[in-house]
Image: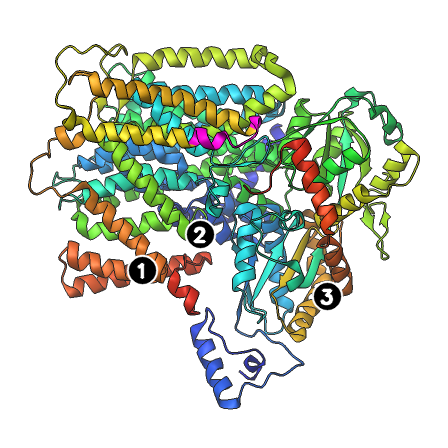
């Protein structure tokens, strides 16, 4: 092992190696700052070049790229509230409120130090772990993986917000949306309604963007301020580092957890950040600031998501099973270089494995270091008047959304989920709960079915299952104690006074919230009806989850109709927010209408032309910009998106016009 | 610029060149020369209906630079990933949009062939419209757990009557081949579905959840051979491959292992035949000997097809290709020309009765419904 160590280090510290790694890091950074363009886009960009390079340099470049993606995607999460990738969705929760307070630089630097630290801890853990990883990974069978998804779902308890019923119903919406598409046991297609797009299910990136970015953009468009809302940008850089140092043990724990969960194939990296976030909440004494800009809410997920990338290397290298999309491309790249993953990676080829692990750590230091330097200047984006920034952000989220399947339907799905997100935000429904349900629905269903097939119900008594169940129980207990949401903390003790203490206000005032619950009930009803069309194995999961969730939604309905004003479940931001009655604040639907406009235009003339038209119209009409400024900004955006698409070899979604006329790229 | 006249006028990514070509066409009447199709200055789009990083994507990215090197005019060959719908989406797109000018090619895989053979409602393409350029074969080896009391392929009959468990990716996926094979052999196999790939299934085997499994050849050599050496897996038989006359023979990569028909004979005492075996052969061919294929769209001229076939032939002889192909292609040789055509026809043809029989069986026994 020492020999392997020495050989790996000798490879690592050559100038050539570091140089190629830097190339990978810089490309990764430039790609990763774009939401939706993660490691997959970056790696496919690199692969033509690595072909024919010597394997050490090529590997260095690949790793530089993979390592920096979960770091650089933090920019959009913090600065714009757009989850840069599925790994940094939780970062939005506290990062963006900090940016809105003018503390973007503080939030970013805290995030980057955490990333750097997470990457290093991940590498240290892996150095030892890699030797015993094979049997340990094999110890996680379908039964244990099912219990792990239950553990992930238990985080809903922490993130459920003020009303547990709301949280569970939201999680239920996620579970129902997540079960759209092929059933794991029989391959039956559920809730697809003959729409080709739905056969594969709704892509996670679209759900993340719709739930988080869309409502924020709509919200920001109601005023004419900048994101930082006129507050001055303090010298937050050093404060962010200090925030991290105060929470170094939280960062350490989350890194370890991230690394281990990343190493277990099957759970997927997408819940790691939520588990870390939940852990940060559970272990905090004062939870009142979570969701409003608590640095702990950034440090935890950012430490975890970088360590996760390292963990994800293990199943990729040892079993040839990529844990994530970017790992899949990394695997493809390795095969092209001539490195085949397999058991020999811990025996005869251990030095290659070590050089990969430690390259990853080094690339993390390089990447996070670069990001730290860039944090302060880039944070100034938050001081630009939002109407000028908005067309860029709207274009960016649409561009990110259609990376999912490169189809116009991605934009339609974004619109639908975005409207759901706006309503959930308005009525105080916890969006993270929906997301967790969505991510874990396929896992929970698949592993439960497989576990029962392999072991019968006795799988519940397997030691691994019992251990994870115990951890889950502890987590739920902590969760009930410390609940949090994005509208503030829960009162201590989760009990909801259902009894009407005072007379309920006029029902008309609660009309919108009640209507929304009815809409949610309709979603569950559709799921149950659709389930009844399928075989037992295809139907049991969606019918089961939808029925339980419908029960909670009905409970909520009862509270909303009969409960008192002080009941935490009663919430309508449009009635009680501070902006109510302020004439400078526009309708919450104006922003949504603009985005819808871009989607409709895309359906007519294709995305690229639609984007150009959208820029001109938006800047002239909404931002009241002069012609010079309008044309200049439009030209910048057009060239930029065109260049990006050209470099990545991608076609834009086409519209009706492209059906009729054969246009040259990029208009086609 | 002379060479650009050999294909019809069209606008491509490189606007300027297309513009120049257009002028040339207008000026000279656009007569097509039959002998030399050249792609000078062109960008050829290679549609891969799968995500980046998978087997098909890696295969395409391996081949692309060689095609570029040997096609006349050295065009840029870019791989365009159009994943979705179990590869039907990108393939439908190709079928609907690709012009027969040699500028757009399609790479398919077994996962594209299977929905076509099964009559999946999402399929809006017809293989019979296209011209095949190249076929890339692979093979597969079935192995079992020593916990079943079996120590070598000779003891195959010990599996009869035992409860076998197979970790399946889905009955309409490539795992239809083992599913049909086990049924033919009358083995009592419980198929547990929902696995995300053969790698995932192999993990279930290593965990002891499944006790019979198969891997494609390169995955077998890298990941199962060590298990065999450690006494944790017993190889049973390979699927086999076709000889020049289209007969099933032993897989040259695994000459010591019986092929499927031999294994069948060892169990039952007679050679396999009948419609169930025909169904197995159809899906086996689409999934293994002709697993990956390159196609040109409907109406492509013979010159362009010939240009591609020539490029493939030259590519196979390139020492650089020979040296680099092992991790990507395993020990198999890609083929073009007549050899590819034979495989293509075999892999994309199934009688309506046979198709119905398989579809009915899948629905009756595994609850599988194609489409809604």
Q: Secondary structure at mark 2?
A: loop
Residue drawn at 86 percent across, 51 percent down = B247
Chain for numbered disc 1:
A
Assess disc 1: are there few (<14), some (14-19) or many (≥20) residues with their C-alpha within 10 Å of its C-alpha.
Answer: many
What residue occupies the far bottom of the structure in this picture? B28
- The percent position of residue B293, horizontal first and vertical second, equals 67, 56
Residue A526 visible in the snapshot: yes
In the picture of the structure, the residue carrying the numbered disc 1 is A610
Query: Most extreme residue toward the right, as rendered?
Result: B269
Q: Which residue is mark 3?
A: B313
Quarter the C terminus of chain A occupies: bottom left
Residue in the picture at 74% in, 60% down: B340
Point out the stretch of residues depicted in magenta: A527-537
Residue for badge 2:
A406
Q: Which of B254/A12 is in front?
A: B254
Residue A119, percent from left and from top: 43, 32
Spot occupied by residue A200 in the image (x, y as percentages of width and height): 50, 42
């Amino acid at each position: 092992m020492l020999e392997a160590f020495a050989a790996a280090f000798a490879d690592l510290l050559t100038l050539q190696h570091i140089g190629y790694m830097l190339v990978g890091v810089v490309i990764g950074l430039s790609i990763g700052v774009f939401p939706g363009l993660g490691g997959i886009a970056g790696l496919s960009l690199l692969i033509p070049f690595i072909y024919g390079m010597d394997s050490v340099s090529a590997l260095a470049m690949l790793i530089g790229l993979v390592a920096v993606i979960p770091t650089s995607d933090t920019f959009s999460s913090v600065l714009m509230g757009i989850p840069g990738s599925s790994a940094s969705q939780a970062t939005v929760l506290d990062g963006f409120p900090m940016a809105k307070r003018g503390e973007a630089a503080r939030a970013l630097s805290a995030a980057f130090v955490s990333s750097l630290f997470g990457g290093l801890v991940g590498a240290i853990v892996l150095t030892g772990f890699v030797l015993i990883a094979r049997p340990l990974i094999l110890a996680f069978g379908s039964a244990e993986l099912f219990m792990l998804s239950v553990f992930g779902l238990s985080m809903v308890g922490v993130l459920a917000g003020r009303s547990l019923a709301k949280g569970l119903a939201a999680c239920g919406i996620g579970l129902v949306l997540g079960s759209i598409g092929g059933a794991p046991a029989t391959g039956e297609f559920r809730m697809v309604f003959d729409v080709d797009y739905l056969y594969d299910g709704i892509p996670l990136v679209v759900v993340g963007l719709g739930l988080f970015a869309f409502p924020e953009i709509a919200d920001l468009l109601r005023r004419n301020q900048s994101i930082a809302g006129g507050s001055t940008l303090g010298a937050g850089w050093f404060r962010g580092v200090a925030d991290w140092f105060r929470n170094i043990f939280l960062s350490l724990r989350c890194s370890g957890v991230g690394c281990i969960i990343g190493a277990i194939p099957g759970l997927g990296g997408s819940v790691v950040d939520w588990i870390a976030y939940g852990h940060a909440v559970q272990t905090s004494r004062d939870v009142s600031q979570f969701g409003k800009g608590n640095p702990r809410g950034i440090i935890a997920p950012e430490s975890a998501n970088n360590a996760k990338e390292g963990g994800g290397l293990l199943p990729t290298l040892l079993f040839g099973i990529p844990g994530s999309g970017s790992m899949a491309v990394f695997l493809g790249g390795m095969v092209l270089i001539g490195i085949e993953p397999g058991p020999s990676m811990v025996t005869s080829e251990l030095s290659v494995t070590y050089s990969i692990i430690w390259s990853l750590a080094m690339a993390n230091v390089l990447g996070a270091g670069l990001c730290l330097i860039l944090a302060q200047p880039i944070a100034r984006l938050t001081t630009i008047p939002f109407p000028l920034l908005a067309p860029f952000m709207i274009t960016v989220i649409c561009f990110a959304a259609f990376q999912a399947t490169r189809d116009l339907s991605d934009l339609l799905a974004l619109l639908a989920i975005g409207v759901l997100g706006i309503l959930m935000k308005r009525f105080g429904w916890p969006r993270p709960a929906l997301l967790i349900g969505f991510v874990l629905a396929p896992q929970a269903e698949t592993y439960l079915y497989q576990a029962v097939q392999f072991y019968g119900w006795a799988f519940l008594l397997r030691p691994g299952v019992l251990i994870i169940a115990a951890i889950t129980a502890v987590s739920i207990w902590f969760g009930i104690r410390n609940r949090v949401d994005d509208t503030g903390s829960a009162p201590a003790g989760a009990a909801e006074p259902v009894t009407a203490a005072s007379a309920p206000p006029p029902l008309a005032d609660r009309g919108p919230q009640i209507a929304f619950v009815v809409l949610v009930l309709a979603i569950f009803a559709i799921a149950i009806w659709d389930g009844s069309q399928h075989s037992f194995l295809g139907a049991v999961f969606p019918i089961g989850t939808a029925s339980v969730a419908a029960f909670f939604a009905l409970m909520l309905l009862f509270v909303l109709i009969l409960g008192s004003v002080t009941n935490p479940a009663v919430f309508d931001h449009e009635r009680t927010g501070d902006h109510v009655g302020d004439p400078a604040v526009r309708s919450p639907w104006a922003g949504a209408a603009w985005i819808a406009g871009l989607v409709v235009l895309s359906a007519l003339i294709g995305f690229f032309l639609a984007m150009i038209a959208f820029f001109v119209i938006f800047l002239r009409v909404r931002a009241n910009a002069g012609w010079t400024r309008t044309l200049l900004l439009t030209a910048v955006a057009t060239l930029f998106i065109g260049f990006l698409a050209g470099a990545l070899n991608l076609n834009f979604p086409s519209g009706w016009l492209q059906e009729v006329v054969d246009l040259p790229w990029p208009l086609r | 610029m002379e060479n650009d006249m050999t294909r019809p006028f069209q606008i491509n990514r490189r606007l300027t060149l297309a513009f120049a070509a257009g002028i040339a066409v207008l000026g000279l009447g656009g007569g097509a020369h039959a002998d030399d199709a050249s792609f000078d200055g062109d960008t050829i789009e290679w549609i891969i209906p799968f995500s980046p990083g998978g087997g098909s994507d890696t295969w395409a990215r391996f081949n692309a630079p060689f095609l570029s090197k040997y096609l006349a005019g050295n065009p840029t060959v870019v791989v365009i990933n159009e994943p979705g719908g179990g590869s039907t989406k990108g393939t439908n797109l190709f079928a609907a949009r690709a012009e027969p000018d040699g500028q757009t090619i399609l790479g398919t895989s077994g996962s594209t062939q299977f929905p076509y053979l099964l009559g999946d409602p999402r399929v809006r393409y017809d293989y019979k419209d296209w011209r095949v350029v190249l076929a890339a074969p692979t093979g597969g080896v079935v192995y079992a757990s020593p916990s079943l009391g079996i120590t070598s392929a000779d003891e195959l009959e010990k599996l009869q009557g035992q409860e076998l468990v197979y970790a399946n990716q889905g009955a309409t996926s490539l795992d239809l081949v083992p599913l049909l094979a086990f049924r033919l052999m009358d083995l009592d196999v419980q198929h547990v579905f929902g696995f995300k790939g053969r790698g995932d299934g192999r993990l279930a085997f290593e965990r002891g959840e499944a006790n019979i499994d198969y891997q494609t050849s390169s995955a077998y050599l890298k990941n199962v051979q060590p298990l065999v050496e450690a006494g944790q897996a017993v190889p049973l038989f390979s699927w086999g491959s076709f000889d020049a006359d289209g007969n099933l023979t032993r897989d040259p990569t695994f000459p010591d292992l019986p092929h499927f028909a031999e294994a069948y004979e060892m169990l039952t005492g007679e050679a396999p035949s009948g419609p169930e075996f025909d169904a197995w052969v159809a899906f086996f061919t689409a999934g293994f000997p002709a697993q990956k294929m390159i196609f040109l769209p409907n109406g492509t001229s013979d010159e362009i097809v010939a240009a591609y076939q020539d490029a493939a032939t030259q590519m196979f002889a390139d020492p650089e290709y020979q040296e680099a192909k092992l991790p990507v292609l395993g020990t198999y040789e890609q083929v073009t020309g007549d050899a590819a055509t034979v495989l293509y026809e075999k892999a994309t043809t199934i009688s309506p009765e046979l198709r119905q029989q398989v579809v009915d069986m899948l629905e009756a026994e595994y609850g599988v419904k194609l489409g809604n």
